[in-house]
Image (cartoon, rainbow, N blue to C red):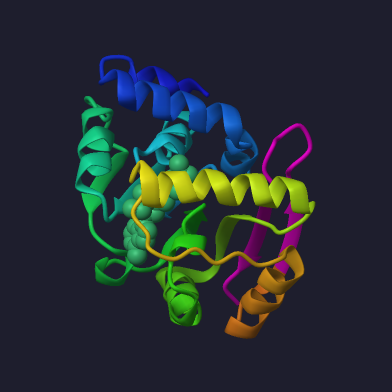
Amino acid sequence: MQALSLYRNQSMGVRLHTALRAWSAPLDAVVEALPLEGTLLDVGCGHGLIANEAALRSPLARVLGVDLSEGKIASARTSVGQRANIEFRLAPLESVPESGFDAVSLIDVLYLVPEPSWTSFLRTCLEKLRPGGIFVLKEIGTRPWWKFERLRLQEFMSTRVLRITQGDTMHFESGEELKQRLTGIGFEEVSLRPLDAGYASPHLLLTARRP
Ligand SMILES: C[S@@+](CC[C@H](N)C(=O)[O-])C[C@H]1O[C@@H](n2cnc3c(N)ncnc32)[C@H](O)[C@@H]1O
């Protein structure tokens, strides 16, 4: 990922985290699912690796990344330099005032949102899109079981022990369950793609459109 070079002058911890992130998840496939032009909202952007990759790949896109973590947003902002087509903001999804985005991405975030709030969280993602806009959801599936159990241990370490990621609860669903949720909320053209081949975690990519 070319965006990794944007973190070259940051702390060893940030460089290690972003490099591990790029190595351990199919982020290129995630970025490829995003449109090349228009406005993109990356919800829970973390250090901004995916938002940055999308903005670097396509100067015609305008990207807004939001996250709850002060440290991650500070790091994401440091990565921006002189580029004008990307902005990072310390904000939860619920307080982003803009809407009408051409694409909304939610990459490995939903499992950290308490499950009773999933429907309203996903509905807010839908409402942030323009009609016909694309939603890109990357999650962790539940199969094969051994990849899922390994991942659960890793996430337990990240959220509870090392506290790299904020989140008190974790909830995972299968690809089919996620697909049904998106359809039930009102998305159309929902498609599911397992992306775990060659990776130790059961990565899943879903794309859908606002009608
Ligand atoms: C595992 S990280 C993924 C970061 C990034 N999307 C990536 O793929 O590298 C999950 C992020 O979601 C953020 N997050 C969780 N709930 C959120 C919310 N309601 N609004 C914005 N960000 C949120 C966390 O702060 C964390 O940085």
Q: Between residues 2 and 56, which one lies in front from this camera angle?
A: 2
**At which x and y percent is residue 46?**
36, 44
Does 207 appear in magenta?
yes
Q: Quadrant of residue 140?
A: bottom right
**At which x and y percent is residue 133?**
54, 64
Tally the marks: 0
Residue shown at the point (79%, 37%) measured from the top left: 197
Q: In which quarter of the image is residue 201?
A: top right
Does 85 appear in magenta?
no
Q: In which quarter of the image is residue 97?
A: bottom left
Q: Is residue 6 left or right of residue 119?
A: left
Q: Does the image show residue 44?
A: no
Name above or below for residue 44 compared with residue 186.
above
Q: In this view, does 179 lie to the left or right of 8?
A: right
**At which x and y percent is residue 83?**
27, 29
**At which x and y percent is residue 70?**
20, 47
Name above or below for residue 203 compared with residue 5.
below
- Residue bounds of the magenta highlight: 190-211
Q: Between residues 154 and 106, which one lies in front from this camera angle?
A: 154
Residue shown at the point (67%, 74%) measured from the top left: 188
Residue shown at the point (61%, 46%) measured from the top left: 151
Q: Does the image show residue 174?
A: yes
Q: Quadrant of the C terminus?
A: bottom right
Residue shown at the point (26%, 20%) measured from the top left: 10
Q: In this view, does 15 lie to the left or right of 138?
A: left
